[in-house]
Amino acid sequence: MVLLAKSYKPGGKCIAGKRVEYVEERKVKVCEWIRPVFDDGTGHGALPTASFTYQDGNEAKVLDIVEVTVKGKVSVAGQPENYIIDDTVKWKKISHLNAESIPNLKENTADIWNEVGVDSNIVTSDFDERGAISQSLYLIKPSNFEVTLSNDYNDFDRAYKRKIVAKFDYSDTTYENISITCPATRRILANQYPNEGEASKTLALNKGDDYILCMSLSPRFGNADQHYKLVATVFDFDGYLQRKYSA
């Protein structure tokens, strides 16, 4: 599989990508989505670092083409692409996909899990139970992509907490308050957050609309039993962001 997301998730990382088949020595056919998960009994377990560490001690990175041994597919509400990994077998790096290839992989979909009457950053369990989630991962090209950084007091944590969310347009719909879990984006903007208690800051990234987003849908979460939409990876068209800042 080629890794297209390695994003933050409580307890570890959420890794996802697409299965690939070699058709020539340096040419691959990109196939369906796969999300390898840890066998913790939930079907959507975060991957600990040891799970995606190669034999030489290096971690798997976004755009690596890797060989991953799985035990089988697991049924999870809202995440039909999940596979339980065999954590006794080390991942093996086979090759690396050029970041400039990502625009060729973008998908066209009518919407990003739109549910009538529901905020654009979530979907309810009812939406899933109606069979409306055929896949929980997409590569899309947005327009008017903006990032908002905040540093507000969180009553639950009793501390100031940094937050980064996205707003963008796609297929005549505006999506906002979408959490960004992409490590490269967080890293490049780490010094841009407002000070504690100051007003939030909204900015456009340097390359305007020349970005591809890997969108991911979370498992059901919280008392409301709903799924959150996430920007798991931000790719720019020349590959600079992931090449220089990926974890």
Image: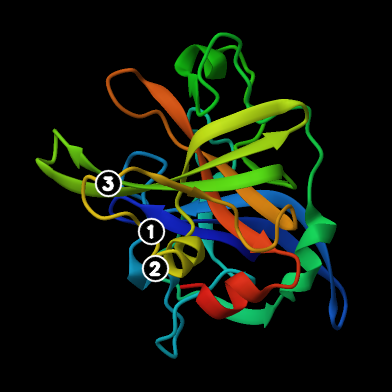
Distance from Cα at disc 3 to Cα at disc 1: 35 Å
Q: Is residue 95 above or below residue 150?
A: below
Q: Nearer the N terminus, badge 3 or badge 1?
A: 1
Disc 3 marks which amino acid? Glu
**What percent of the width, then of the height, locates residue 217?**
52, 37
- In the picture, measured across the screen, residue 69 lies left or right of residue 170, that is left
Which residue sits at x=59%, y=42%?
81
Pointer 2 and pointer 1: residues touching (CB < 8 Å)? yes
Q: Name the residue under label 3.
A: 198
**What percent of the width, then of the height, locates residue 2?**
66, 66
Which residue sits at x=38%, y=58%?
47
- Viewer-proximal residue, 218 or 32? 218
Helix or strand or loop: what does disc 3 sit on? loop
Residue 207 in view of the camera: yes
| Residue located farthest toward the top when viewing the structure as drawn | 117
- Select label 3 or label 1 by which is in front: 3
Q: Name the residue under label 2.
A: 51
Q: Which mark is residue 97?
A: none
Q: Residue 47 carries which label?
A: 1
| Residue located farthest toward the bottom when viewing the structure as drawn | 56
Disc 2 marks which amino acid? Ser
